[in-house]
Amino acid sequence: MTDEQRVALVTGATRGIGAAIAERLAADGYSVVGTATSAAGAATVAERLGEGRGIELRIDDDESVTGGLEHIASAFGAPSIVVNNAGINRDNLLMRMSAEQWSSVIDTNLSGLYRVVKPLLRSMMRARWGRIISVSSVVGRMGNAGQVNYAASKAGIEGFSRALALEVGSRGITVNAVAPGFIETDMTDELNEEMRAAMIEKIALARMGTGAEVAHAVAFLASEGAGYITGETLQVNGGIYQN
Ligand code: NAP
C-alpha cells in the first residue's frame, strides 16, 4: 500500500460475496465503500464499513451510477480499486425466457460494468495505477441449462476484461475477473436440497465455497504483488470445472 490509503469501491456489498469482499479489503487496510440498491441496504453496509461508507447505487441505472460515483469521489476520493460484484440471475429455459428476463440480466451484469468502469478510468489513468476486478462465474465458461442470459453476461464480463486490459495496461491498470463456482449465498439458497446435492457431487473439493474464499482471490488481485497479472480470470470453483 502507498502512504495514501487507496479507495476501493465494491458494488453489491450488502450480502453474500460482495459483503465478504468489502470486509476483506477493509481488513487489508483499504478505504472501502460499498453499494446497495436501497437506503436500508446502504445502512447495513455502513454498519460494517463505517459511517457514510454504504452508498445507494443501482448499476442498471445511468443516473444512479453517475450520482453515486460523484458522491464517492467527493466524500472519499476517486476509487483506484473497483470490484464489480453486483449481479442478478433470472433463470429460465430459453424457450420460456421472457425479453425482460433476458435484458434485465444483461443490463445489470454486463452493461452495469460499462456504466461503472468507464467513468473511473480517467482518475486511474492519471494516477497511473488501478485495479479493475469483476466477479464473473464458472457458468460463463461451463454453461448451465436455464441460464443462457446469466452465462452470456458472465462470459461477456471476461471478454470485457481481456479487451480493457489491452487498452489500459500501459497506464499501470490491471483488469481481471474472478469466477466463483458454487458459493453459499442468497443466490444459491434458491436451490432445493436435491439440486444442491447433485451439484456438490460434481465438485472436486466436495463442498460449496464461501464468500471469504472468493474475497481472498479478489484481495490478491487487488494487491501490489498481483501487478503483473492482467486480462486473466481466476477460477475459485473447488474444481467443478477446469479450463
Ligand atoms: P446475492 O447474495 O444475490 O447479492 C447480490 C448483490 O448485488 C446484493 O448486494 C444486491 O444489492 C446487489 N445488486 C443486485 N442488483 C443490483 C443492481 N441493479 N445494482 C446494484 N447492485 C445490485 O449475490 P451473491 O451470490 O453474493 O453474488 C455476487 C456476485 O457473484 C454476482 O455477480 C454473482 O453473479 C456472482 N456469483 C455468485 C455465485 C454463487 O454461487 N453465489 C457463483 C458465481 C458467481 P441489494 O442487497 O441491495 O439487492
Image (cartoon, helix red, strand yellow):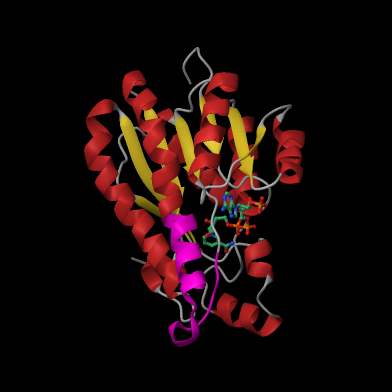
Residue 220 point in image, percent of width and height: 47, 39
Residue 174 point in image, percent of width and height: 33, 36
Residue 33 point in image, percent of width and height: 60, 32
Foreground pick, 224 / 13? 13
Q: Is 50 situated above or below 90?
A: above
On-image quarter of the C terminus: bottom left
Residue drawn at x 22%, y 29% as measured from the top left: 170
Q: Assign ligand 1 to one image quadrant.
A: bottom right
Query: Magenta segment, which residues?
Result: 89-110
* Residue 219 visible in the picture: no
Residue that lies at the very extreme toward the top in this rendered image: 3
Foreground pick, 151 / 94? 94
Quarter of the view holding residue 10: top right
Residue drawn at x 36%, y 19% as measured from the top left: 127
Q: Is 60 one of the magenta-colored residues?
A: no
Give the total of numbered labels: 0
Foreground pick, 4 / 11? 11
Residue drawn at x 68%, y 47% as measured from the top left: 14
Residue 113 point in image, percent of width and height: 42, 48
* Residue 222 visible in the picture: yes
Foreground pick, 113 / 189? 113
Q: Is 33 situated above or below 128?
A: below
Left or right: 21 in relation to 136? right
Quarter of the view holding residue 148: bottom left
Residue drawn at x 54%, y 18% as measured from the top left: 5
Q: Is 78 situated above or below 186?
A: above
